[in-house]
Image: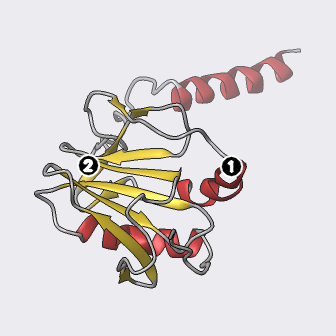
Amino acid sequence: MTAVAVPVVVVLIVLVHVLGNGSGGSPPAAVAGPTTSPRANLPVLPVDVPKVTPQANASCPALMKTLPLELMGDQSRRVRSASPFAYAWGDPPVVLVCGVAAPAGYVRGASAIQINGVQWYVDTDDPHTVVWTTVDRPVNVEVRVPATVDSAPVTALTTQIAKALPYREPTPGK
């Protein structure tokens, strides 16, 4: 019986020493590097969104899962909305909503801006916010940008939009 007990005791001592950092061991190694949070430490942003349509349910998840945690140096932030298809970055915020209605001003003859293969209707009526809305995807995507910010956030998002949402011929109103 002693022949069995001695090896078991030795194994237990070794395990306690290795796992429990017994006497004579060195402390765990320190891990260096940035400890940034994946989301900015900002208040939750309420975002008004339209009712989710079947088209949005079919198309928007593909876009939402590709959105970056950081956009133009601003971290994403938490949003509160009635739709899972809203996302925001920074303060003042850049806000994306997938599955919005066609922009009211986009009518036959209205010009659109093309960036990296995505066509946008741009509404500058609000002096504080520029509203960019895609017009050539199966669902419209709206990006609200502070008026003090140029088109860089929209340009950065076109890659994800073009990959996630296939092109369709724009159909402006009358």
What's the mark number on residue 115? none
Please name the residue that numbered disc 1 is placed on.
57
Indicate the amino acid at tag 2.
Pro
Query: Quick one: 124 or 43, which is closer to the camera?
Result: 124
Instruction: Tell me, yes or no, if residue 67 can be seen here.
Output: no
Quadrant housing residue 112: bottom left
Cα separation, mark 2 vs mark 1, equals 36 Å
Give the quarter of the figure containing the N terminus: top right
Query: Quick one: 56 or 121, which is closer to the camera?
Result: 121
Quadrant housing residue 38: top left
Q: Residue at the spot x=64%, y=52% of the render?
A: 56
Dot 2 falls on a residue whose secondary structure is loop
Dot 1 falls on a residue whose secondary structure is helix
Q: Residue at the spot x=40%, y=34% of the render?
A: 79
- Vertical placement of residue 135 versus 49, above or below: below
Q: Position of residue 135 (x, y in %)?
A: 49, 70
What's the mark number on residue 34? 2
Indicate the amino acid at tag 1.
Asn
- Reading the chain from its start, which is encountered first: label 2 or label 1? 2
